[in-house]
Image (tube, rainbow, N blue to C red):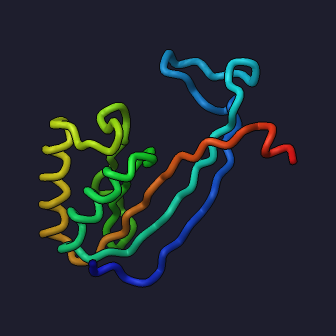
Amino acid sequence: MNTHPGKVTQTLDVSASDVSNSEGGTVTESEGKSAERVVVEELKISGDALVAKVKELIHQGNIRRIIIKNEEGYTLIEIPMTVGVLGGVISAAFFPVIAAVGIIGAMVAHLTIVIERQESADVNDQAK
């Protein structure tokens, strides 16, 4: 795969009180026993390897969001990974997204993929 050197990783710790639930409210400490840890990675990649890399990331399953940016840093597409991916299986809803990613890869030579991963961590483990 033609990825350029320069992988950047940033880790953000998000407590359960900072996480919004699906009804628009926030989860309190008593409701959520664990905190979320968000790891942000940036990969420099060439346009021809973009579709393969996005498919690989979708199959991993622990991705919250994939953002594809051009060389100047402008966001070309932002793909939220929600219930559409269960167990690393690409659902039919992602086929148009993969097609759009393929068009972007064909038009732009050098891209940056920003990957937000969600990792669960016990609140008790963080206190140690």
31 up-or-down from 1: above or below: above
Q: Residue 99 vs residue 40: left or right?
A: left
Between residue 3 and residue 89, name the one nearer to us.
Answer: 89
Task: Answer above or below: position of 91 versus 55.
Answer: above
Quadrant for residue 101, please give it. bottom left
Does residue 89 appear left or right of residue 19 in this picture? left
Q: Residue at x 35, y 40 (%)?
A: 87
Image spot of residue 69 (x, y percent) = 34, 63
Residue 29 location in percent, x, y? 75, 24
Q: Residue at x 53, y 46 (%)?
A: 118
Residue projecting furthest to the right: 128
Check the image and report above or below for 102 versus 23. below
- x then y, percent, for residue 57: 35, 56
- Residue extending furthest bottom? 5
Of 26 and 2, nearer the camera is 2
Residue found at the very far front of the displayed protein:
87
Residue at image point 63% right, 58% down: 11
Asked which quadrant contains residue 71, the reply is bottom left
In the rendering, at what x and y percent does residue 13 appear?
Answer: 68, 48
